[in-house]
Amino acid sequence: MKRLSLFSLFVGLCMAAHAWDYSSQETAVAQSAQLRLGADFTKEWHNGIALEASEELRFDMYNSLRGPSFRKSYTTLAFAYKPVQYFRLDAGYMLKLIGPDSTWSDAKRADANEWIRHRVFASVTASYKFTYAKLYLRERVLMEARTDSVNLLEKNRFDFQLRSRLGAVFYVPGKPVKPYLWCELFNTLNAPEYQQKNGRQYICSVRTQAGVKWRVSKLSSLNFFYRFTYDYDRDINITKKKARIELTEETLFQHAVGVTYNLDW
């Protein structure tokens, strides 16, 4: 019993060593509603290789903190390879443009490094097709790079994440529509030491989406969808010489509706 108590005390001390005593701690909750418009272009070859290009624009129609505005633009180029029936590999690059908000200074608006992000990703997808449905699991690792000036104790210049998506696509016999739904978890992989939750990496986002893909012609289709997102961020502000370490836990509940045009050839 005594050994068990000493072991428990040791574990508690180790965990306490990773639990930062922040000078101040606040919470912020936001609500937003978005409109998303996009276009996807896919070229597939018979050897299982595919080239994919896409563009998506996101607009905040309502935001409880910032007000309506252009929010983000995503431009993506990716290659995919399907070596066997049940597995798919892909990798790509994304250019992300961030729309400025009312809190930005004129100098920040003028600096392109503030609103440009670079992202590279790689993923593997396992799927299994039934008579009227297909289930799939996608694991994706991504790295997002920023070139603006940051305090490396507060933010990374290179952020790594693991994204796990479980989804299903349903087939309607004789109809040109495919209803689908999926849920995805985002997990930080290298959050800075002061940003970690209880000394550990943490789930920073949960996203669910339901929609329907409508085949309007042999090569073209439209994707209508609704997405709900729960985002959790730990914003850190560290003053000079670490005199104060301020933590703001930011929670966002986001609703988004959108339509995407798909061209496959």
Image (cartoon, rainbow, N blue to C red):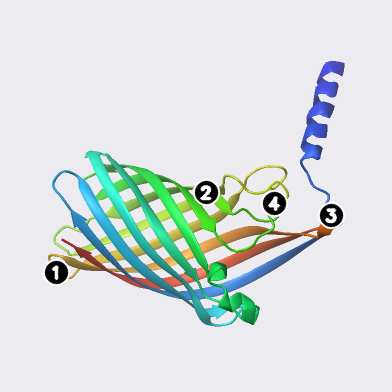
Circle 1 or circle 2, nearest the eye: 2
Disc 2 crowd rating (10 Å Cα; few below 14, some 14-19, many 20+) is many
Q: Which mark is residue 217?
A: 1
Using the image, determine if residue 247 lies above or below residue 217: above
Residue hosting label 4: 195
For the residues labelled 1 and 2, the Cα–Cα distance comes to 37 Å
Residue hosting label 2: 161
Amino acid on which the number 1 mark rests in the picture: Ser
Tell me which label, 4 or 2, sits earlier in the chain.
Answer: 2
For the residues labelled 1 and 4, the Cα–Cα distance comes to 49 Å
Label 4 close to label 2 by CB (< 8 Å): no
User: Which quadrant of the rendered structure holds the C terminus?
Assistant: bottom left
Element at label 2: strand
The answer to whether residue 1 shows anywhere in this view is no
Tell me which label, 2 or 3, sits earlier in the chain.
Answer: 2
For the residues labelled 3 and 4, the Cα–Cα distance comes to 17 Å
For the residues labelled 4 and 2, the Cα–Cα distance comes to 14 Å
Residue hosting label 3: 241
Tell me which label, 1 or 3, sits earlier in the chain.
Answer: 1
For the residues labelled 2 and 3, the Cα–Cα distance comes to 29 Å
Tell me which label, 1 or 2, sits earlier in the chain.
Answer: 2
Residue 144 horizontal side relative to residue 8, left or right: left
